[in-house]
Image (tube, grey):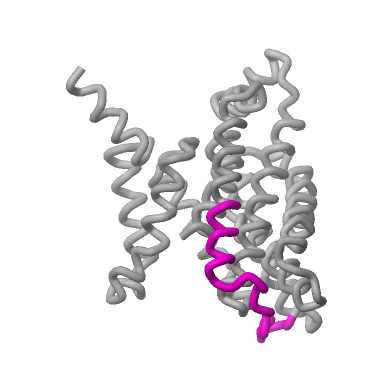
């Protein structure tokens, strides 16, 4: 649950704050997972491997952001969707990354499962606090203006390319940390764990929670991450249920859970 919350909040920075629709966010999740797994198998402790995993994912996110500066809206979504397919295709062909088989035997963390839980919760909490601060800062106001109207923001003197790159770097770095934690939680990773379906699933969590809302996205990610565990019989229909939830949210509450609760508060007044 904590890892999924961190993963969803990282996408919320790109899509929710800055309005850049990304359909390939799972690729950066996978980059962090593979980087963390390779480093710990080489003898690094998990805590030391988190920073390089975040740095590598953030650097690749910076490069993707550079390539995406000239595209918007649907074209941006298609571009980022290609990143997910590209990542899976590259990993499948690299034997030193496990190829089709993936990487197994990822070392258990020295501080045990309970310690891993505390680290995951701490990382999710810290990233949530950072995004809340970011949303209320001058950078957050710049993100809001770009999300509302990119052309107007540029006319008003906001350096749109720079803030777009910042959103990609921050968001993909958070995904890299989540991926490294995920790799040590399951202790096996393969290319199928970070495909297009995972990107769509985390985007659905952001939409259902409420694009741009930190607490609502965290709540939606937490609930939807354990929903298949509570209802084992619906696990095979998880994507169908997510799709129906997204449809219902866009039809009845376009601002997600956050918007629905705000409407309930206004009614008595």
Depicted 1 relative to depicted 91: above or below: above
Q: Position of residue 192 (x, y in %)?
A: 59, 75
Residue at left offset 67%, top offset 70%: 88
Q: Position of residue 78 (x, y in %)?
A: 61, 52
Q: Does the segment drawn in magenta span residue 249?
A: no
Left or right, 225 with respect to 71, comes to left
The picture quadrant where one finds residue 217 is: top left
Q: Position of residue 264 (x, y in %)?
A: 23, 30
The picture quadrant where one finds residue 19 is: top right
Observer-nearest residue: 96 or 153?
Answer: 96
Q: Does the segment drawn in magenta span residue 105?
A: yes
Observer-nearest residue: 267 or 46?
Answer: 46
Left or right, 170 with respect to 238, comes to right
The picture quadrant where one finds residue 74 is: top right
Residue at left offset 62%, top offset 24%: 137
The residue range painted magenta reads 98-123
């Amino acid at each position: 649950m904590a890892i999924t919350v961190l993963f969803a909040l990282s996408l919320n920075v790109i899509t929710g704050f800055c309005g850049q629709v990304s359909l390939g966010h799972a690729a950066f999740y996978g980059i962090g997972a593979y980087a963390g797994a390779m480093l710990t198998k080489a003898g690094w402790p998990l805590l030391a491997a988190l920073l390089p995993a975040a740095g590598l994912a953030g650097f690749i996110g910076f490069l993707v952001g550079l390539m995406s500066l000239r595209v918007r809206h649907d074209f941006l979504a298609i571009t980022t969707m290609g990143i997910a397919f590209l990542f899976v295709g590259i990993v499948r062909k690299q034997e030193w990354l496990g190829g089709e088989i993936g990487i197994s035997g990822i070392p258990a963390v020295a501080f045990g499962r309970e310690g891993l839980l505390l680290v995951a919760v701490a990382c999710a909490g810290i990233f949530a606090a950072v995004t809340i601060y970011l949303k209320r800062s001058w950078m957050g106001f710049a993100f809001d203006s770009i999300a509302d109207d990119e052309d107007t923001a540029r006319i008003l003197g906001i350096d749109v390319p720079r803030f777009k790159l910042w959103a990609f770097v921050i968001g993909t770095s958070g995904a890299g940390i989540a991926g490294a934690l995920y790799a040590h939680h399951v202790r096996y990773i393969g290319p199928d764990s970070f495909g297009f379906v995972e990107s769509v699933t985390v985007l659905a969590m952001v939409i259902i929670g409420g694009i741009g809302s930190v607490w609502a996205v965290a709540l939606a990610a937490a609930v939807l991450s354990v929903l298949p565990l509570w209802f084992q019989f619906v696990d095979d229909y998880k994507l169908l249920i997510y799709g129906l939830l997204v449809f219902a949210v866009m039809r009845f509450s376009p601002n997600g859970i956050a918007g629905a609760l705000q409407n309930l508060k206004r009614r008595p007044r």
